[in-house]
Image (cartoon, coloured by chain):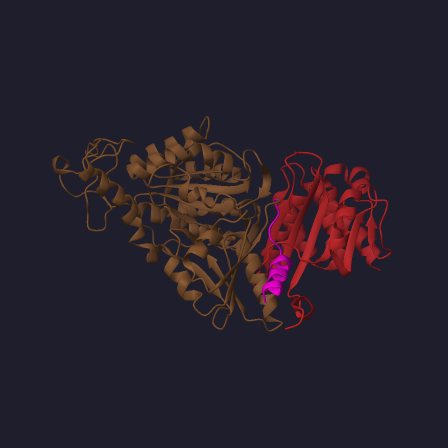
Amino acid sequence: MGKLLDKIEIPQDRYEVRLSGSGGQGMILAAVILGEAIGGGDGRNVVQSQSYGPEARGGASKSDVVISSNEIYYPKAMKLDMLLAMTQESMDKYYEDLKEGGTLIIDSTLVTHVPTENYYGLPFTRLAREEAGHVMVANVIALAAIGAITGVVSREALTESVLSRAPRGTEEKNRKAVEIGWREGLKLKK
Amino acid sequence: MAEHKRKLMQGNIACVQGAIYAGMRFFAGYPITPSTEVAEGSARELPKIGGRFIQMEDEIASIAAVIAASVTGKKSMTATSGPGFSLMLENIGYAYITETPCVIVNVQRGGPSTGLPTKVSQSDTMQARWGTHGDYTAIAVAPSSVGDTITETIRAFNLAERFRTPVTILLDEVIGHMREMVTLPEPGQYPILDRVKPTVPPDKFEPFAMTANLVSPMPAYGEGYRYNVTGLTHDTMGFATNRADEIWPKLDKLKNKIEHYTDEIAKLRVEMMDDAEIAYISYGTVARTSLQAASIARTAGVKVGSIQLYTIWPFPDKQLLELCARCKKVIVGELNMGQIVHEVKRVLPRDIEVHTVQRYDGEILTPLQLLKKLEEVM
């Protein structure tokens, strides 16, 4: 028998997303919102997992969402279909996990060096601060842009999922964040 | 019903849901990553159904409260991680010898000591079997998904009640914190077992009586049956003894009441094994990596399958032996320096090669790691 690793086929029935940034940017919450929006919508299977340090703020933070119509065996990403990088550190750390032709989306406010021409850059943090009224909703703006660019989740399902997780009194800011992200994402898609 | 809709749920919360379904009405604990959500979920849910949640001053007090609550008749649980499990062990021994049903959830993280609070590990597998001192037999189960966590928690309570013994649920950081789509079980979907109560009048009551199945009926404190509960080795009336003819039967009872039923307690998931010449053997999170690796290797025509142990203790010797009868090689994957692999080596005949893949840097084994090992041993 020859080399096994040359003969195997990597399963094509999975769509793998990684949301990455630093602790406090809401990457894990964003992944939960995305998972709920997808899993609650059309009955696909979803696994959301995470990796973080003991710090409450700072430190690298990532969360994977694996989506499939079949049973999901390995719960984390094997080769990413989509990577969101909200910091330069996460960009540098996880770019190599993106599959060839995978979708790279970055926060151009904080990520300045991108090792490819083939990516979508939007200033999520700046949009959150200047247009949505709070830096905290940068993660929701990013989610909406992901939805608009990749089609992995519908706008309706995402809005519902965001609002069900939004603390009382922040609904309007969050609704606006989805609007901004979706709008900016569609612009880039053209 | 809306509440039984499919939803995205975290493993630790699934554990709470399974426990409540099984009849948990008391939880005492001390928060520790990565188990804290089990305590949080219990604190939220128990008051709604007339149960009680107490945050204790530490893990030693937590397991003490759990044992005491169980003696009063309430199905009780605590949740912790390695450092807390170490602290609980003395009192867990007290639960073994007093034959008090309870469930201990250990959401494993890297160790020893404070170790890796937010990182996954399976390094408490042996601790769940041999952690407290003395002779006894332990039951431990290991789920590998959020859905499993519901059903294995229900099973853990049922085993605890049926055999009057502590049962450990070996979760790990990945399963405890991951979220998956699950549907909560409907009432009646799974059988719920309750401890057998005495039917004799209180003055004829023998609290640790030798019965046919070695499990003594257990009254709740306050129901009129008085008896002594002690950590000293005791006679069938519950009083301390130094007599050999009472010590032997008591210790044999702790062992045999469980080991005579190993076949019933054993639970394994067997996939792609019909024609398999090589088997991945694993449990918990790693079982998912094994399934992934086996299904990928099958695309290249390799006859490899996956055996997943849901029941870790008592170790399913007979089942493993039968399943591996046609195998030439097995690969045991673990997130530790090698624990269950020694059980596998003990059980399997010498002509089956036992290979291992170990990882203990706080990350889970990847399919690629298991496939590389497969390539190496083929």
Viewer-closest of B43 and B360: B360
Q: What stretch is highlighted in magenta?
A: B362-378
Q: The red chain is which one?
A: A
Viewer-closest of B251 and A107: B251
Viewer-closest of B32 and B94: B94
Residue B357: image location, x then y, percent:
57, 54
User: Number of numbered discs present?
Assistant: 0
Residue at (62, 37) in percent of width and height: A168
On screen, B11 above or below B69? below
Q: Is residue A160 left or right of residue A125?
A: left
Residue B13: image location, x then y, percent:
50, 44
Residue at (69, 42) in percent of width and height: A61
Taking the image as drawn, is residue B207 in sight? Answer: no
Taking the image as drawn, is residue A119 in sight? Answer: yes
Q: In this view, does B259 lie to the left or right of A51?
A: left
- The quarter of the rendered structure image containing the C terminus of chain B is bottom right
Q: Which residue lies furthest to the front in this view?
A: B350
Taking the magenta stretch, the answer to whether it contains residue B372 is yes
**Chief secondary structure of the magenta portion:** helix
On screen, B63 above or below A107? above
Residue B122: image location, x then y, percent:
52, 46
Q: Residue furthest top?
A: B57
Viewer-closest of A44 and B372: B372
Q: The brown chain is which one?
A: B
Residue B44: image location, x then y, percent:
48, 37
On screen, B212 above or below A58? below
Q: Is residue B200 left or right of residue B105?
A: left
Taking the magenta stretch, the answer to whether it contains residue B251 is no
Residue at (19, 47) in percent of width and height: B211
Q: In this view, does B135 lie to the left or right of B142?
A: left
